């Protein structure tokens, strides 16, 4: 089962996907949020290529653990996407994922202009990987 992660921003939506075994997250694309909301052919193509069985959307959480003011908008948009695609929805903490993505891209030699379209998809892959790692640890503890 593959999981498709969405980092829904006001303008852009970063997209990442897990492998079928749910061990590794891969950044795959950044689309405009409007394209994703409208189920545009570019987004449909991603859904057809990867056939996800779960949408995982990042929720902005403050450092104190409370939901950020953007969380309500993201919950509404994610629910809309889930209903349009008929794919179940889950949420995860995306705290600091964009900052981590920016740092990783800078360390890889990317400048601000080159990073612009990549930060969102890298951030999605980071919180997806965290989600996968947590699920793996939980499964190991149950054994």
Image (spheres, helix red, strand yellow):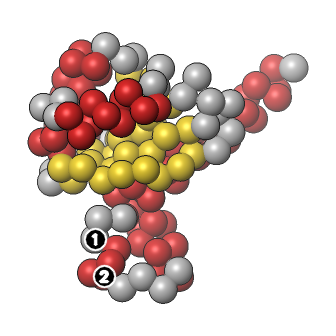
Answer yes or no: is residue 110 visible: yes
> Measured along the vertical axis of the image, is residue 52 above or below residue 118?
above
Q: Secondary structure at mark 2?
A: helix
Q: Position of residue 114 (x, y in %)?
A: 32, 78
Relative depth, front residue between 44 and 14: 44
Q: Residue at x 46, y 26 (%)?
A: 52
Q: Position of residue 67 (x, y in %)?
A: 32, 42
Q: Secondary structure at mark 1?
A: loop
Disc 2/disc 1 C-alpha distance (Å): 6 Å
Q: Residue at x 42, y 82 (%)?
A: 110
Q: Residues within 10 Å of mark 1 (few under 14, many from 20)?
A: few
The answer to which image quadrant residue 133 occupies is top right
Task: State the residue lying farthest toward the right.
Answer: 143
Residue for badge 2: 112
Q: Position of residue 96 (x, y in %)?
A: 43, 60
> Measured along the vertical axis of the image, is residue 123 above or below residue 101?
above
Give the left or right position of residue 19, taking residue 91 as reference. Answer: right
> Mark number for residue 48?
none
Quick one: quadrant of the C terminus? top right
Give the left or right position of residue 118, taking residue 41 as reference. Answer: right
Give the left or right position of residue 123, taking residue 130 as reference. Answer: left
Relative depth, front residue between 18 and 139: 18
Residue for badge 1: 116
Relative depth, front residue between 117 and 128: 117
> Measured along the vertical axis of the image, is residue 105 above or below residue 91?
below
Q: Position of residue 5 (x, y in %)?
A: 42, 39
Quick one: quadrant of the N terminus? top right
Labels 2 and 1 touching (C-beta < 8 A): yes
Answer yes or no: is residue 9 visible: no
Number of numbered tags placed on the structure image: 2
């Amino acid at each position: 089962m593959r999981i498709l992660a969405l980092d829904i921003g006001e303008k852009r939506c970063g997209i990442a996907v897990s492998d079928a075994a749910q061990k590794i997250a891969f950044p795959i694309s950044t689309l405009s949020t409007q394209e994703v909301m409208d189920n545009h052919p570019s987004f449909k193509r991603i859904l057809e290529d990867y056939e996800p069985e779960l949408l995982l959307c990042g929720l902005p959480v403050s450092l104190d653990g409370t939901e950020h003011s953007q969380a309500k908008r993201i919950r509404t948009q994610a629910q809309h996407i889930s209903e349009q695609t008929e794919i179940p929805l889950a949420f995860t903490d995306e705290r600091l994922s964009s900052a981590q993505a920016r740092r990783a891209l800078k360390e890889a030699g990317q400048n601000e202009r080159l990073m612009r379209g990549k930060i969102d998809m890298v951030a999605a892959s980071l919180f997806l990987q965290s989600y996968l790692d947590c699920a793996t640890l939980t499964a190991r503890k149950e054994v």
